[in-house]
Image (tube, rainbow, N blue to C red):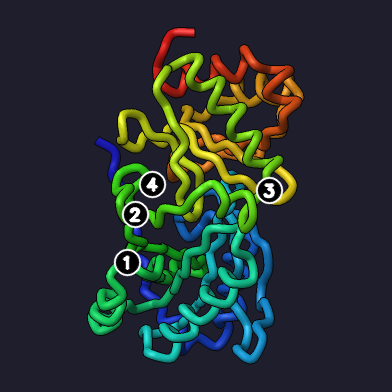
Amino acid sequence: MNKINLIQPEKVNLKDHPILTESWLQDIIAENPEIIGLGDLILKDKERKQIRAGRLDVLLQDSEINKRYEVEIQLGKTDESHIIRTIEYWDIERKRYPQYEHCAVIIAEEITSRFLNVIGLFNGNIPLIAIQLTAYKNGDDYFLTFNKVLDEMTLGLVDEDEEISEVTDRNYWETKKGTPKTVKIVDEALELITEVIPGYQLKYNKFYIGLAQNGRADNFILFRAKKIFTRMEIRLEKSEELENEIESKGIDLMGYNKRYGKYRIKLTLNDLKKNRDFIKDLVRKSKGIPV
């Protein structure tokens, strides 16, 4: 039996290290965003200046969905000032860029129990991830580990707790969110849906126009009427073949939301007229009906 050479690396305290500084760690994460273990991320900015609030260490974005991560780095233990700063940067960015989903991330060498207790008070109101960083040395080589000790609370899907959504009406969507023209696109799309599965009606909520059947929400498709276009979000498994097919029809594919498992598609009246049968097939696929 071959002898296994077991390496016992030395743990390194980065806070007291003369060379491996916070700036160095920022550069490492900026060059290799996937190293922190949150998926396929891309760098959007580093040392991002915040109005009257200092600088955000690193801003990352998911390459497949409109989600951004406001990352604050702290060498040593988490403390109150860094907690506040992390949440403050998250709040500033989500207000400046509401078209994205945002999540605060704090990376520290030691995530204290006090930190976890304080974050627990927010009870899921603030999406926050805590990652504990550990650095090791073996000879002249260093390596880092990132261990997620607190994940953001997974929120229910929009149709799982429908009663908490603020109900609005058609006028709200025609005047405040969209226009009569973009809401008309929703009407035309509903007509296609009911040709496949009769009985669906529109349900106007504050942040989206959903579907209901027999008085019960069923948001396998939902709509967001804007001032200049309408977006349809349809629940489908992610597929490169399907994406190519959608784009070959001349339909504007706006991306995929991994959290909800939905494609985001920009719809026009011309799309609905030109690709009527294809969109009906998408409805069938979403509901598991053979095409």
Which residue is denoted by mark 1 in the rendering?
A: 124
The Cα–Cα distance between marks 3 and 4, rounded to whole angstroms, is 23 Å
> In front: mark 3 or mark 4?
3
Q: Which mark is residue 155?
A: 2
Q: Nearer the viewer, residue 82 or 108?
A: 82
- Does residue 84 appear to the left or right of 265 in the view shown? left
Which residue is denoted by mark 3 in the rendering?
A: 179
Q: Position of residue 124 (x, y in %)?
A: 32, 66
Q: Nearer the viewer, residue 166 or 127?
A: 166
Q: Earlier in the sequence, mark 1 or mark 4?
A: 1
Secondary structure beneath label 2: loop
Q: Nearer the viewer, residue 198 or 119?
A: 198
Residue sitting at x 29%, y 49%: 161
Q: Is residue 105 above or below residue 231?
A: below
Which residue is denoted by mark 4 in the rendering?
A: 158
Q: Residues at badges 2 and 4 in contact (C-beta under 8 Å)? A: no
